[in-house]
Image (spheres, helix red, strand yellow):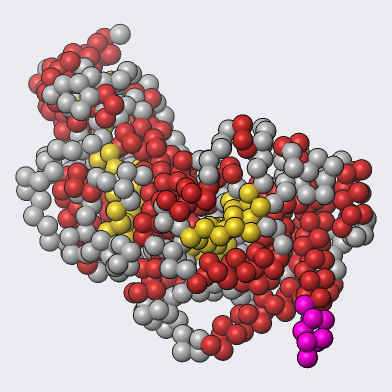
Amino acid sequence: MLDNILNKNREDYEIDKLGVNCLRGLTIDMIHEANSGHPGICLGASSIVYTLFKRHLLINLEDDKFYNRDRFILSAGHGVPLLYGIYYLLGILSLDDLKKLRKLNSLTPGHPEYKVTPFIEMSTGPLGQGVATSVGYAIAEAYLNKLSNQEIDYYTYVLCGDGELEEGITYEALSLAGTLKLNKLIVLYDSNDVTLDNKLEVSSREDIKKRFESINFQVIETDDQVNNIDNAIKEAKKSDLPSIIICKTTIGLYSKNQGTNLVHGKPLDDEDIYQIKEKLGLYQTPFTASLEVVEDLKTNVKNRFQEYLDMNKAKKQENAIVKKIIQEENTYNLTDLEIDYANKSLRDLSGEVLNKIATGFPLLIGGSADLSSSCKTNLKEEEIFSRDNYLGRNIYFGIREHAMAGILNGLALAGLRPFGSTFLTFSDYMKPSIRMSALMNLPVLYIFTHDSFTVGEDGPTHHPIEQLLSLELIPNLKVYRPYDFNELIGCYQEIFQNTNPSALILPRDNKEISDLTKTSGIKEGIYLIKDTEYPDYINLLANGEELGLVLKVSTNLETIGIHTKVYSCPCMKNSKHKLIKQLQEETSIAINFGAPNYYYEITNKVIGLNNFSLCGAKEELLKHFGFTVEELESKILEYLNK
């Protein structure tokens, strides 16, 4: 009996050793073929990825959308050949796919890309994004587990290196994960003491163990051996805390430059590849893998999934919430809203609309970077999401704007409809994650209030100037800036009937309502709200708070014989090319409380603000910067007389 056990252990050891080495060989062959890539992490961290897939990761090889799969996020996205190699061994990718690493239109781009390669959970590459998004996945699991009566139940694993842990977003996100006790989150840390430029000690001498203990993580330390990594993951699964497994590895293991930054970011030469394969006992023929390894890996992954099915026969995923998520029914039809909008600011009205949506839409979840009382995004009938209550839908992200945005991406990837809020000027802290929302086309709603210098006394640090333009420049991000309640409803209808990322930009105080604006105007993007019967006219354009000022200017100009058409521009990306061309050909003047080049696609005649603002009361600032009816009228006349 003992001999049988020992023989089995020896067999497992040999097949695992061969499996890890096969993965190493495939990765360096891919990078050599592409003549581009990062062999260091591939040689050093192969045992981590191999162990996770063989011993733990629950996936259905026949269905990458199986909802209760475990999520594995390669935050260190430059190590993507590790994933492609494993996917080849599992039959997900072909040999031809591996040979097309980093080639145009291949299934094997240079970093993981969501919806390009099967079984890729998110696009990674910008360091730290994967870690933050994994926290979103873990929050979604905790919430949906309670909401679905435990039908939804998965682990979130994320592989990172020092590149991620030095980025501020990871500390923000993982600090929140520890606070929330997200014990289904397991971070695998490839600790090799080297960064791209030099030894780690040159830029950081931080005690990672103490750091993570201080933020309420279980810390497990191990080496790079399969059985030890396996035991560490088993231990992590038993914890009631999130875990970080510090795996001590050697970057570029077996390379002549192992343990140095020289092996981090460029292909190995032929001589180095030859001697590595000699040491590993691999065939020198490129892209060679052991059939024994292939069968063993597939068998383990398939058996684990079958065991899951056998143990969870009652979990047919027929729960209504589960069905909505699996079938991607995460849109919401906003109709018949009964809201008293008289004498209320637009941010207050936005909060009321959000609360109405939440009442009939349990997939809505979100919060604020410590500004829910200012942004009016608190869901009043819902509780706080906390370590004691995973059914809460108000997430208190703390003063962590960047992490908030990354976490929202994870919530959206898990099938929820998340929102996050802060002041518009602080959107700068969030740009990398907002960009990832747009790149992956995720239904994340960013609510930005306090949208111009009319915020007043807080001064230029709080006055957005270029932020609206910078958001508008992000491809695939719909930016909405309504003027009044009519347009606000149109914005929310557009946002929740579609599944692209959105930024809703709102003023602090504007309470005006116009009988000229239209809810349906949001679909048009730019639409006419005030016409003229005269053939000689000028076009005045604005959105948001400025539109009320423009309407007053239009009335004044009419009294002196200058006829005007007024256009509202609540969603520039919805605008039609034909209308834009018309506005370009005609005399069109835009008014903007921020950067004038926001309107340069339509007209170069813009009255805007090309410098940072000042501290002062709203009315003082309007007068100082020339945004009064009289001053604007005078500037428009100057334009026309040139």
Residue in the image at 42% along x and 79% along y: 151
The kind of secondary structure the magenta stretch mainly shows is helix
**Can the viewer see residue 324?**
no
Which stretch is magenta? 1-9
Instruction: Give the quarter of the image for residue 574.
Output: top left
Give me the residue at 29% from left, 26% from top: 461
Q: Residue sitting at 32 percent across and 27 percent down?
A: 465
- Determine the residue located farthest toward the top in the rendered image: 642
**Quarter of the image containing the N terminus?**
bottom right
User: Is residue 218 rendered to the left or right of residue 465?
Assistant: right
For the point 41% across and 29% down, the residue is 601
In the rendered image, residue 614, in percent from the top left (x then y), is placed at 23, 19
User: Which residue is more in the foreground, 543 or 207?
Assistant: 207
Residue 20: image location, x then y, percent: 77, 62
Q: Position of residue 625 (x, y in %)?
A: 21, 17
Q: Up-down: is 469 above or below 189? A: above
Q: Quadrant of the C terminus?
A: top left
Q: Position of residue 550 (x, y in %)?
A: 19, 28
Q: Is residue 55 visible?
A: yes
Residue 194 placement, left or right of 419: right
Q: Quadrant of residue 297?
A: bottom right
